[in-house]
Amino acid sequence: MSKGRAEPAGASPERLTIGARRYGAASVRGLPFANLLTRKEQRELARIAETVTYARRQSIFKEGDRADYLFVIEQGVVRVSRDLMEGERHVLAFFRPGDLLGLAEEGRYINSAYTLTAVTLRRMHLRSLHELLLSDSQLQLRFLLKAAHELRMAQRQLIVLTRKPPHQRLATFLLNFMNHREYFSAVENSVYLPMTRDDIADYLAIRPETLARAFARLERDGVIARFSPREIRIRNLSELIHLGTV
Amino acid sequence: MSKGRAEPAGASPERLTIGARRYGAASVRGLPFANLLTRKEQRELARIAETVTYARRQSIFKEGDRADYLFVIEQGVVRVSRDLMEGERHVLAFFRPGDLLGLAEEGRYINSAYTLTAVTLRRMHLRSLHELLLSDSQLQLRFLLKAAHELRMAQRQLIVLTRKPPHQRLATFLLNFMNHREYFSAVENSVYLPMTRDDIADYLAIRPETLARAFARLERDGVIARFSPREIRIRNLSELIHLGTV
DNA sequence: CGCCTAGTTGAAGTGTGTCAATGTCTGTGG
DNA sequence: CCACAGACATTGACACACTTCAACTAGGCG
């Protein structure tokens, strides 16, 4: 069964092996995602994009850095966060393949981006992207729809974080991750979480201790089981959905 | 001085008189707003837009309604909210002139919109807007930038609502309103709030009682003074900024 | 002028934050 | 491959802030 180890440091990010169970490959095409790029649009972008790779646990950019590029994630998971006063930190999102990275204001990134796994990105100079979007309005519409999608997600998250108790925030979070093949094994009914408890706590706007109690509660109520801190088995999906649906 | 009365029910929304003090006229052009439309772009939009007006305290649309139109606010204030379980409600925004109204998903509005004052809107059929945006990529870029702006605001709000105590959320809220000529009188240093305490509480994700205590605290600390529930005088701006800046 | 709604204030309950200690994993080096 | 160190995660006890429940006040509209 599961040995409960974390993902191997040198592993290719598209194949994460958890115990004996293999988590499927990530692919930009074929993900159950709204607003993804068509092949033609990807080719268009490829003309102005260059591929860059980052190792695990590296900073891509920090808030306040000059924003020269917009990134599209090809592979891996990126943590997007903002620093608050006195070492506090808010995690705004965990971005995965297909997501757009690099929200800026007045030429500066407003968030920091950090790789949780090895990551492959396509980056585009804002200047050339600007030109391309003006010349290809179908492509631009994709970006607009993607932005609208992000806006809906942000509003959703706002409601979850301000109105739901910790165990329901956690339920919502787990459901989110179950929607992504790379980190959900349907055979074992288990989710692999590629981030630490501190990351999740900062994402759900609670303390790590409170998060631990939320995990304990879901486990006590038979909703989940914990193999290891990062591998969670779903034991009662309908109850999880009941708790986690906004 | 101020008679502390609420805005007159039949008043034209572009001139709100508070006591002896007159609050300036609202205008789409000239507002200190990023991402506003140029005159040329407004003419473009005008071709497919029709002007509609709503009286005060009316529903424009409800969440779940078929989304046929996107709205641009010309005059007045619109409350955007989402219903939660059991009569609870979250207010996502108070929209003013220049704001885009009508975020939808799968052909349905995801929020409800309600007028707090008399409101003038321009509404555009999504179908014709879709066409227009594809044919005018400069205009589409405006919409994209506006969406990015909304996204930044949502992230900001997320941090305020999850990390700041009630009196600081209130400070942030008051500062927001001070940025808008229609509701801020520089001469008297006073802000007029066109919504009820319940609206503000639902926006700040606190109970009305907690909001009342937050008002009391800012007043006790000499930051504000209350003429009437809806008219607030700013007594210590730098402290308000200190408290309310994210 | 009086009723009804909106707003404020007080007192008690509850859940999350905080502080501290213990337990457990992970990734390193031998 | 194994063992160990340090980071990560969990659990318990207590404090405090917001919520809840209730009473009271004030303002606006009929």
Image: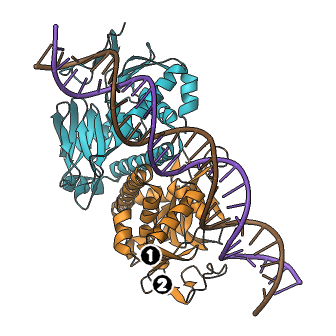
Chain colours: A orange, B cyan, C purple, D brown
To which quarter of the image does residue B237 belong? Answer: top right
Q: CA distance from mark 2 to mark 1?
A: 13 Å
* Horizontal and vertical percent position of residue A67: 58, 53
Q: Is residue B47 left or right of residue A132?
A: left
Q: Where in the figure is residue B117, as x and y percent of width and height? A: 24, 29
Q: Is residue B223 above or below residue B166?
A: above
Q: Nearer the viewer, residue B97 or C22?
A: C22
From the top left corner, tell me how far across and down residue A152 is, in percent.
36, 55
Residue at image point 43% right, 38% down:
B34
> Please, which chain is the residue tagged with disc 1 on?
A
Which label belongs to residue A28? 1
Q: Which residue is mark 2?
A: A24
- The structure residue drawn at horizontal position 46% and vertical position 44%, both measured from the top left corner, is B157
Q: Nearer the viewer, residue B82 or A116?
A: B82
Q: Is residue A69 visible?
A: no
Is label 2 or label 1 in front?
Answer: 2
- Type of amino acid under label 2: Gly
Residue A58 in percent (x, y) is at: 66, 65
> Crowding at label 1, few (<14), some or many (≥20) Cα neighbours within 10 Å?
some
* Amino acid carrying mark 1 in the image: Val
Residue at x 19% of width, y 40% of height = B59
Question: Decide: marks 2, 1 in contact (CB < 8 A)?
Answer: no
Q: Quadrant of the N terminus of chain A?
A: bottom right
In the image, residue B29 sits, relative to residue B124, either above or below, namely above
- Above or below — where is B66 with respect to B224? below
Q: Judging from the image, what secondary structure is the residue with disc 2 in? A: loop
